[in-house]
Amino acid sequence: MSGVAVLGTYDADARHLFGIDLMRYLTAHGHSPSAIVFRTGAAPRPDIPLNRVHALDRHRSVVQVTEFNDPAAVAAIRSLRADLLVYAGGRDLLRDGVLEASRLGCLGGHYGPLPEIRGMGTVEWSVLNDRPIVVAIQRLSRGVDTGDVVLQAPVALRADDTFTTIRERCYFWTKVMLAIATRAVLNESIKPSPQRPEDGRQYYRLHPDVAALATRRLSARLQAYRSHPWAPYSA
Amino acid sequence: MTSQLVTSLRDRVQLRSRLRRLKVLYSNAASAPPPAPKNAVDPARLSDLTKYKPEVPGHAEVFLRDAQGLFEPILDDLTHWDGALAWLLRAQEVTGCGGFSVGYSFAHGWLPAYPETTGYIIPTLWDAFGLRGDDRFRAAALAAADWEIAIQLPCGATRAGYEGDPDGFWSQGLVPAAFNTGQVMQGWNRTFVETGDSRYLDAARRAADFLADCVDERGVFVKGLSPGPLSRTRAYYARAAYGLAWTGVLTNDRRYLDVARRHLDWVIEQLRPNGFVSYASFVATGADDDALTHPLAYVAEGLLETGLLLNESRYIDASRLVAASMMQVCEKRGLFLPATLTRRLTSGDRYSCLPGNAQFACLWLRHGMMNSDWPMVNTGLKMVDWLKGVQSLTSENPGIRGGLAGSWPVDGGYSVFAYLDWTAKFFADSLLLAHAARQRLRES
């Protein structure tokens, strides 16, 4: 089997996984996933075997794992012989076994301009550093957000935004951009740019007092959106 | 008794649903601003996006911004105006000939130079030179005017379309086009006024000789019809008549003025009491067919400018009627101007034609300031601010940064996925008017 395999945390019934928005976006971009490697948010599903390729039909299969880096899971992912893996998001730190389990590696999203802002709390740190809030798609590497950059786009804001709504939007934009990046990587219409470790900085979870400053800075940034004539509709 | 009650209830329900259907058909309040983003996008729209190189920097962010009803920050008028002018200068630089690129296409990149729009961008450059005193604008205006002379056809006309259209829409070669000629004449007229160089007026006179022969006894343009648009009767040539009238004034040639008047008198016959104008469209084949805001604004602009030039109040009044009716259309929808309108001024469109929006912003501000009509100024200022929200001043893509697209959203129904030189031109004009209007408001 070849093509695109998606890695993610999903609780939906296996039959419905291919109808999830990311899969539909990938299909819209001409690359329907051939496999979905998933773990649930809780106990494993009893109806799907663990760490084995479970065919749904001739073209689609699923693999249930408890941990993506588990050697048995990696073996199952390798057996998919996917051209490209797409990591749908979450807090997993994917190790070499997974990252090298496909021909072209594994794409993943990040909410911050790369290479400058890596790590955690990156939306808040982008605001604190007076940088745009960006969704970046990278080819994941062993380091934290140090993979080759495939695509970046600043995320548009609204007058009534909060860090929560911005992160929700980033999550949505990431899914669309993963689909765009998948197509571009497979069609070779884009050349990912390598990052140098020294060009950026890794950030960590914010202290509440620093988070409060970020909130005030965000409010100041959103001032420029409040004079849009449609702002009352969004408030 | 029960059956009578049931019958009466059924009749009422049927009547109500019929009335609701009629209301939808004839109501002005069809479309409204989009609701807050739901963080979802129709995958069918994404399929279209794949044809327009979404991996190129800037493309995806514009699509996603528009698809979710999000906007850019709103800054002061001249900051946005600087951005628009910088985009225009870039659009000229990329062609290397003096003409302005049609625009930046997501599919093809920068497009070739466009004679028609280069003509009417020239006055915008002279305005910029007047405001900033920056020689780059003067040089750009002269280069554009000289290029227009270099490509003027032997008959005096400007050609239809442009050379090298990657989509093959303009593949008919060097066809004389009356509308384009009238727009280029405005560029020459203004350049003559600014420089006193008779070469420009001579070129305009040759063009006027061609244009004056295109109008029949009824006042209809029957010759020089560009082969691109499907319509064969065109009221938006009012904007060409303005070029002709202006050359008539500058050369003191009565014939040009008479022909311009004859055409505009015919245009006024196409104007309906509700402000709709027949044949204000690129595709209308009948008088009742829908209008598009961009050519409808051409009509109102041609009437207004000629009215002011010749001191003809009926032309100005006609223009005001169009502007006022479109103001109602826009305000009733919560400041959303649909691209096309039926003769009853209804529309089911969920997209705007951005050049039309910018042109109407200019018309509202001009009529508003001429008559101290503050409601019209109010709508004009709001529309200018709305347009600022679709201009990215920070995109890393130079084809997007400072420019404006053809449609909102960018995948709407007019020149999709393209940033157009004429949107940038009319937006720049609207920003200067807004700047003046805000000053007037402060002083009032």
Image (tube, coloured by chain):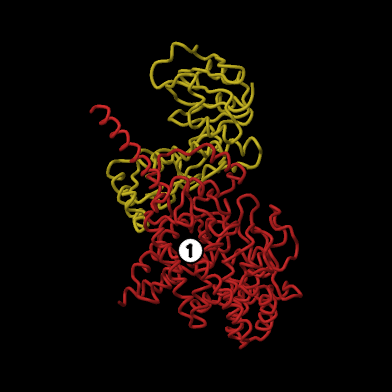
Q: Residue at x 65, y 73 (%)?
A: B215
Q: Colour of chain B?
A: red
Disc 1 packing (10 Å; few <14; some 14–19; many ≥20): many
Farthest left residue? B1
Residue A235: image location, x then y, percent: 31, 49
Check disc 1 and report the residue beneath it: B358
Whether residue B21 is situated above or below residue B176 in the rendered picture: above
Residue B204: image location, x then y, percent: 66, 80
Residue closest to the eye, B12 or B230: B12
Whether residue B404 is situated above or below residue B429 in the rendered picture: above
Q: Quadrant of the C terminus of chain B?
A: bottom left
Q: Quadrant of the N terminus of chain B?
A: top left
Residue A154: image location, x then y, percent: 47, 48
The residue tagged with tag 1: helix, strand or loop? helix
Q: Colour of chain A?
A: yellow
**Left-right relation of A124 to B129:** left
Q: Residue at x 54, y 30 (%)?
A: A86
Residue closest to the eye, B403 or A103: B403
For the question of whether residue A164 can be seen, the reply is yes
Q: Residue at x 73, y 65 (%)?
A: B175
Q: Residue at x 41, y 56 (%)?
A: B73
Residue closest to the eye, B304 or B275: B275
**Left-right relation of A123 to B351:** left
For badge 1, the amino acid type reads Ala
Residue B355: image location, x then y, percent: 52, 61
